Amino acid sequence: MKKFFAAIVALVVLTASFASVLASSYVGNRNSGKFHYANCTYARKMNQKHRVYFNAREEAVKAGYIPCKRCKP
């Protein structure tokens, strides 16, 4: 029973920590200065440490990121 409870707690913590990532529609790359739709091929290949998440296109543009020429967010 203790293991089951610990697994449930771990799942809740993981879900809460990734909620903002899952809700984000756009992913920016700190190195290239470009942003992509979250499902863009380039966004999926991007190294995790270079990612910046945005909820709105305007937010990414205001932060100085430029749109990807492939997915055209």
Image (cartoon, helix red, strand yellow):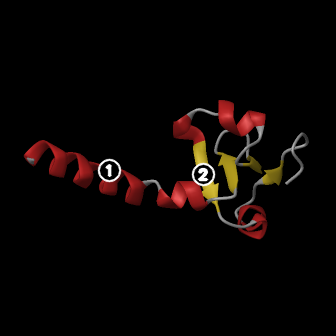
Q: Relative to residue 54, is residue 36 drawn left or right?
A: right
**Image point 82% across, 52% down: which residue?**
66
Residue of label 1 = 11
Which quadrant: the C terminus? bottom right
Marks 2 and 1 close (CB-CB < 8 Å): no
Total count of labels:
2
**Image point 74% across, 68% down: which residue?**
62
Residue of label 2 = 52
Q: Relative to residue 12, is residue 48 drawn left or right?
A: right
Farthest residue in the left direction?
2
- Residue 28 spot, x, y in % from top left: 68, 49
> Real-space Cα distance between discs 2 and 1?
24 Å
- What element does badge 1 sit on? helix
Q: Residues within 10 Å of mark 2 (few under 14, many from 20)?
A: some
Residue type, label 2? Val
- Sequence-first disc among 2 and 1: 1
- Residue 57 spot, x, y in % from top left: 77, 64
- Residue 58 spot, x, y in % from top left: 78, 69
Q: Residue 45 carries which label?
A: none
Q: Mark 2, mark 1: which one is toward the viewer? A: 1
Q: Relative to residue 19, is residue 58 drawn left or right?
A: right
- What element does badge 2 sit on? strand
- Choose top left, top right, bottom left or bottom right for residue 41: top right
**Image point 67% across, 35% down: which residue?**
44
Farthest residue in the front direction?
1
Residue type, label 1? Leu
Pick the front one: 5 or 22? 5
Q: Residues within 10 Å of mark 1 (few under 14, many from 20)?
A: few
Image height of 4 relative to 61, above or below: above
- Residue 12 spot, x, y in % from top left: 32, 57
